Image: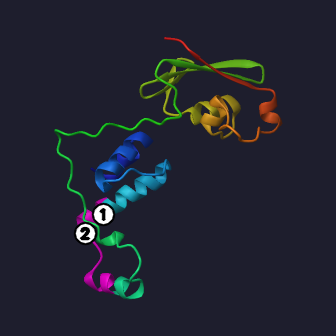
């Protein structure tokens, strides 16, 4: 695997790769962080871990610190046991049509097994579709599905908009 291959992966694929490589699930959904973290581990496997001198210095300066740098590198998974990609729990089930009325115009997005369809085109993220509709950056989940329960409503930009989700299979 190369760093270029990491760049082509979706967040769900990066999270699955993180679980495979580190043996633990990631708490981050930040794409660049996951790429950097996985690239660091690839480099570590290629060039080796910290030098014995660095390990001694760490043990001397921080004896109570967790020894993450000493954790064994898990063996690569065999081709016969592929890891299942994780699914973002915020994404509605496949086939769901999300309807958003923005500035008086109705926009419909269909959830696909890998991405979303809007106006006959496939998109990787809701954020890209929201940017196409509004002309500015949006968190796609906030734009299409609303804020989490208990969160404050946004300002006037959303005052003229409605959000709804319909299931059409």
Observer-nearest of 56 and 134? 56
> Which residue is the site of mark 1?
43
Residue 65: which quarter of the image?
Answer: bottom left
> Which residue is the site of mark 2?
47
Q: Residue at x 36, y 56 (%)?
A: 38
Magenta-colored span: 42-56
Q: Name above or below for residue 41 compared with residue 102.
A: below
Q: Is residue 24 magenta?
A: no
Observer-nearest of 49 and 124? 49
The circle on residue 66 is none
Q: Residues at badges 2 and 1 in contact (C-beta under 8 Å)? A: yes
Q: Name above or below for residue 40 compared with residue 145.
A: below
Where is residue 14? Give x, y as percent: 39, 46
Main SS category, magenta section: helix
Residue 164: which quarter of the image?
Answer: top right
Q: Name above or below for residue 75 compared with residue 5.
A: below
Q: Is residue 52 magenta?
A: yes
Q: Secondary structure at mark 2?
A: helix
Whether residue 10 is visible here, answered yes or no, is: no
Q: Residue at x 27, y 80 (%)?
A: 51
Q: Is residue 154 left or right of residue 95?
A: right
Q: Is residue 99 left or right of residue 74?
A: right
């Amino acid at each position: 695997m190369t760093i270029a291959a990491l760049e082509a992966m979706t967040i769900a694929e990066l999270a699955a790769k993180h679980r495979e490589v580190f043996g633990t699930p990631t708490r981050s959904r930040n794409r660049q962080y996951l790429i950097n973290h996985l690239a660091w581990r690839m480099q570590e496997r290629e060039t080796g871990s910290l030098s014995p001198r660095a390990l001694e210095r760490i043990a001397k300066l921080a004896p109570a610190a967790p020894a993450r740098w000493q954790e064994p590198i898990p063996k690569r998974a065999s081709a016969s046991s592929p890891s299942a990609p994780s699914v973002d729990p915020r994404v509605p089930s496949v086939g769901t049509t999300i309807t958003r009325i923005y500035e008086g115009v109705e926009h419909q997005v269909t959830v696909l097994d890998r991405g979303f369809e809007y106006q006959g085109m496939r998109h990787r993220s809701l954020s890209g579709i929201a940017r196409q509709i509004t002309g500015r950056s949006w968190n796609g989940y906030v734009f299409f599905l609303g804020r989490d329960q208990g969160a404050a409503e946004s300002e006037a930009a959303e005052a003229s908009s409605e959000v709804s989700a319909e299931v059409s299979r």
